[in-house]
Image: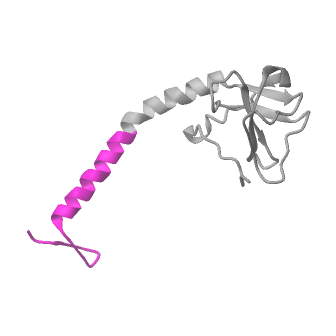
Amino acid sequence: MQSVAFLNLELDPVMLWLALATITLLFLLFIISEPRRRRNNRRLREQYKSIYRVISAPSDDQFVLKADSTSIEVNDYGCEAEPVYQDGQIYLHGLNPRWEVVWYAGFRPEQVEIVGPKPKSQYYIFGSSTFLVDKLG
């Protein structure tokens, strides 16, 4: 087979077709998976739609992730989030003034009270359902 010159590079036609086939396959997989991702995000938006106020801090035996020098205090507010475990706790994440997640924790129902609905769900932003905790310690 004869090689193809492109941008002064010698490209093997087999490798060129293989690259094109791979790109096409990845594009098709994205197109096929998009409706499922949208359905999942819609379900998450509808299921985790509230803002809560912390009445008491989570105990040591509960699930807690925090950024360095961050604490969860009484009267903090948190947005309801997808749970890590199906353990009956209400999982919330707290935001800093730049709207970055700085803590994520599970609370027992008596440790929080519902304040109202979220103005916009985190499961809407670019279709993302995952938020990372900033600078985990």
Q: Position of residue 75 (x, y in %)?
A: 91, 33
Residue at image point 48% right, 33% down: 37
Q: Quadrant of residue 131?
A: top right
Residue at image point 84% right, 20% down: 110
Relative to 73, is 106 on the left or the right?
left
| Image quadrant occupied by the C terminus | bottom right
In the image, farthest residue toward the right: 74
- Of 110 and 133, nearer the camera is 110
Residue at image point 89% right, 27% down: 55
Q: Is 104 located above or below residue 86 in the figure? A: below
Relative to 105, is 23 on the left or the right?
left
Q: Position of residue 122 (x, y in %)?
A: 66, 36
Q: Is 74 located above or below residue 27 in the figure? A: above
In the image, farthest residue toward the left: 1
Q: Is 133 located above or below residue 75 in the figure? A: below
Q: Which residues are magenta?
A: 1-30
Dominant secondary structure, magenta: helix
- Of 85 and 2, nearer the camera is 85
Q: Position of residue 13 (x, y in %)?
A: 16, 65
Q: Quadrant of residue 27?
A: top left
| Image quadrant occupied by the N terminus | bottom left
Residue at image point 82% right, 47% down: 97
* Colour treatment of the image: one colour
Q: How many marks?
A: 0
Q: Position of residue 33 (x, y in %)?
A: 41, 35
| Residue 105 lies within the magenta run | no
- Of 113 and 15, nearer the camera is 113
